[in-house]
Image: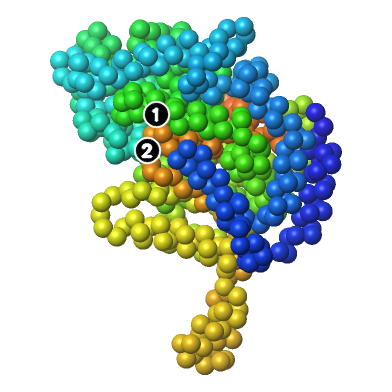
Amino acid sequence: MKHLEDLPTWRELWKHFDATKGQHMRELFEQDPQRAERYWVEVGGMKLDYSKNRITDETLELLMKLAREAGLPERMKQMFRGEKINTTENRAVLHVALRNRTNAPIMVDGEDVMPKVNHVLRRMGEFAHEVRSGDWLGYTNQVITDVVNIGIGGSDLGPLMMCTALKPFGHPRMNMHFVSNVDGSQLRDVLEKVHPETTLFIIASKTFTTQETLTNALTAREWFLKHAGDKAAVAKHFVAVSTNKKAVADFGIDTANMFEFWDWVGGRYSLWSAIGLPIMLYLGEENFIEMLNGAHLVDQHFINAPLEQNMPVLLGMIGVWYINYYGGGSHIIAPYDQHLHRLPKFIQQLDMESNGKQVTLDGKTVEHETAPIIWGETGINGQHAFFQLLHQGTHITPIDLIASLEKRSNLPGHHEILLANVFAQAEAFMRGKTPDEVRAELQAQGMDEARIEELVPHKTFSGNRPSNLILLNKINPRNMGSLIALYEHKTFVQGVIWDINSFDQWGVELGKQLAKTILAELTGEIEVQPHDSSTAHLIKLYRNANCDKDKGEC
Ligand SMILES: O=P(O)(O)OC[C@H]1O[C@H](O)[C@H](O)[C@@H](O)[C@@H]1O
């Protein structure tokens, strides 16, 4: 494939950028009364208002032309067909198969994956039903009240985010806990809250080799056995979710208690697989299927809708416009919803681990920016913390504002305040406030002219700051499925444009590798190896702080 910089539209877009960068969105709205209607797209229960972006019809036309030149439609088909587009790991990328509700065959290495997808889904459903109904009993014949998911990265963030988002749909008896950090204080805090007789541990790890997860799992099992005594009791309280049967068996979990998934499911794309078991246990099978249905709806839209009306393509390409042309190195996710407070962290892994790359598929160093830094917080809290920078700072910081149309609580007045703030922020980002508007406001307050002139620059808002507004009719399993699929495909779109592999994550390996040696050095298992002087100093510092003088270790 041709490199991005060689595509004719890449250069055309630069010219277009130079010609339009001074334009203010206020003018664009004034010139086109239909702008809001035209820059609007709906899929299922999800609406996207992308009118408050620094784009014109020509920008969109060129961006879609660029997407076609970069081969986006074909790459989309390759993913859906199960081709091995994760080339560095020689794997297909088939999270779409996990929610392929039509059951149309999807082939990998000559095998239709749908029967095994459906088989695991059925097993998860049966298990969830048993646990939720109280038929599944612990070793002292008590029902399960607490579920502890032990996993990290993709084996934690998705289930944690969904269970948090969909709390109103959760089983009233089921308390969900998530342990990811190897810092023992997280596990200890959870173990202090739960009881071994009524707790189910899910050990979730795609590879089943992740040090943090296995360490936490071993500690949890020791804690459990200290209470239960009998190893036979483990089967009632520990299940595993993994692609690695052998490692699960070696760990001591009966593979009859294992829920499988496959190497063509990336960790950060895995909440639809058996990794979603905590979601199914909390929400029930029906709601889990609804979540799959919502994602499937977006998959169908993504693969079938013309690029010009394609929600993930629009979000992805508008993102490219800022990242590559405006040089916006950061992108904010701001849900106006307390239960969505984990969403920014989930999207952070999804986007940054997928597209935080600097070489193209053919191994050449890229000559353009790739993934932005994704960060965020619930919008209303962000307003009282970092929104100052978004309104008056020096960066271009596109923001996705996400809210529910339906009221989220029955406490009078709250939702209206929330939505008034979302709409107001989007308007403020776009319009800003001109010096003349500031002057008029201060004059109306009767302020003297000299003081007004002092204050005008401080109180002026340049505006022209981009935002997308994503509205969900309501926050339910179906719409959450749609929302997450939207972001997954948006990430894919950008990866295709940048010609990178969005589905490997070699960047996380080096630190893991070095930590192995350093761990042995910290525990004194091996002598301190040659390191740079800073690392060597830190290791010695730790060893001195933790050595036992009486044993002559110091
Ligand atoms: O599910 P696991 O194999 O335990 O992996 C957990 C996580 O750790 C890895 O280092 C990767 O960065 C993540 O993509 C992955 O989700």
Which residue corresponds to mark 2? 476
Q: Earlier in the sequence, mark 1 or mark 2?
A: 1
Q: Label 2's element?
A: loop
Which residue shows up at 84% across the image and 41% down it? 8
| Quarter of the image where the N terminus is located | top right
Question: In the image, is residue 290 above or below residue 407?
Answer: above
- Type of amino acid under label 2: Asn
Which residue shows up at 73% across the image and 64% down it? 22
Q: Name the mark on residue 460.
A: none
Which residue shows up at 35% across the image and 32% down it? 178
Q: In this view of the protein, can residue 148 be seen by the observer?
A: no
Question: In the image, is residue 503 above or below residue 228?
Answer: below
Q: Label 1's element?
A: helix
Local packing at callout 2 (Cα closer than 10 Å; few below 14, some 14-19, many 20+) is: many
Closest to the observer, 540 or 348: 348
Give how far apart the Cα atoms at labels 1 and 2 are: 9 Å
- Type of amino acid under label 1: Glu
Horizontal and vertical percent position of residue 494? 66, 38
Which residue corresponds to mark 1? 290
Question: In the image, is residue 31 above or below residue 536?
Answer: below
Q: In this view of the protein, can residue 78 be seen by the observer?
A: yes
Closest to the observer, 169 or 252: 169
Horizontal and vertical percent position of residue 312? 59, 39
Horizontal and vertical percent position of residue 434? 60, 75
Local packing at callout 1 (Cα closer than 10 Å; few below 14, some 14-19, many 20+) is: some
Question: In the image, is residue 313 above or below residue 381?
Answer: above
Contact (Cβ within 8 Å) of mark 1 with mark 2:
yes
